[in-house]
Amino acid sequence: MPLKIELRQGDITQMDVEAIVNPANNDLILGSGVSGAIHRIGGPEIQEECHRIGTRPLGTVAVTTGGKLKCRHIFHAAVNPLGMWADAKSIRNAFRGVLRELVERGTKSVAIPAIGTGAGAFPIDRCADILLEELREFAKAPGPVETILLVLFDEKNYAAFEERFARKFPELWTQMMDRPLPELPPEPEPEPEPPPRPPGRGPDRPSPGRPPRRFRGRRRENRHGPPPPRR
């Protein structure tokens, strides 16, 4: 059966799939956003499993049961340190790890949120680019995976994924979504790059021909004589 990729707007904890993906901190503490909803609805046993697993390296995946959720497994993608932001490298590596786990475990259906955009504060447009690029490669050899749902909680995030899906991969859209391409606004002009900084200049370097501030201050002290001796 060919792989089907579909965009959904809704609550990922309510998806009827074999597995869901949780964008997690690398201490696997279920706090806010998707993690908080999983903890609240799936029950404390999920957090207890995470505690037993312990801290994971960034960009890796830990797997637990689904607790009281409909899914059998939760793939916890460690994309940011606790209380800090996610970055593109950890999101891409963790998502690749999720896709490998799906194949190795024989998972047929999975729901995936906008990884790293909640507590990880990663931009939604860049997240969409990363996930869709990886899915395009994965679709060439999906193994047992039959259905991938990209689940976006609100209309704004859904629109960001929809636009990038249709604009960057139009042939994949018509193949996977089973509906015509949506009408898209003209793509905005890229912002010009800032001019290069002159060599040897920067916020932490003095201007040519001027001594650093600490030397000017030292000369002012010398005008008043040497400092008094220490007692």
Image: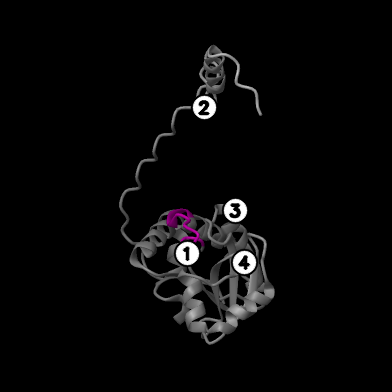
Label 1: how many Cα within 10 Å (few below 14, some 14–19, many 20+): many
Callout in the foreground (4, 1): 4
Label 2: which residue?
202
Q: Earlier in the sequence, mark 4 or mark 3?
A: 4
Label 3: which residue?
89
Q: Is residue 32 above or below residue 186?
A: below
The region drawn magenta spans 116-126
Label 1: which residue?
114
Q: Nearer the viewer, residue 42 or 148?
A: 42
Quadrant holding the C terminus: top right
Distance from the alpha carbon under mark 1 to that under mark 3:
15 Å
**47 in magenta:** no
**Contact (Cβ within 8 Å) of mark 4 with mark 3:** no
- Type of amino acid at the residue the image marks with label 3: Lys
Callout in the foreground (2, 3): 2
- Type of amino acid at the residue the image marks with label 2: Gly
- Type of amino acid at the residue the image marks with label 4: Asp
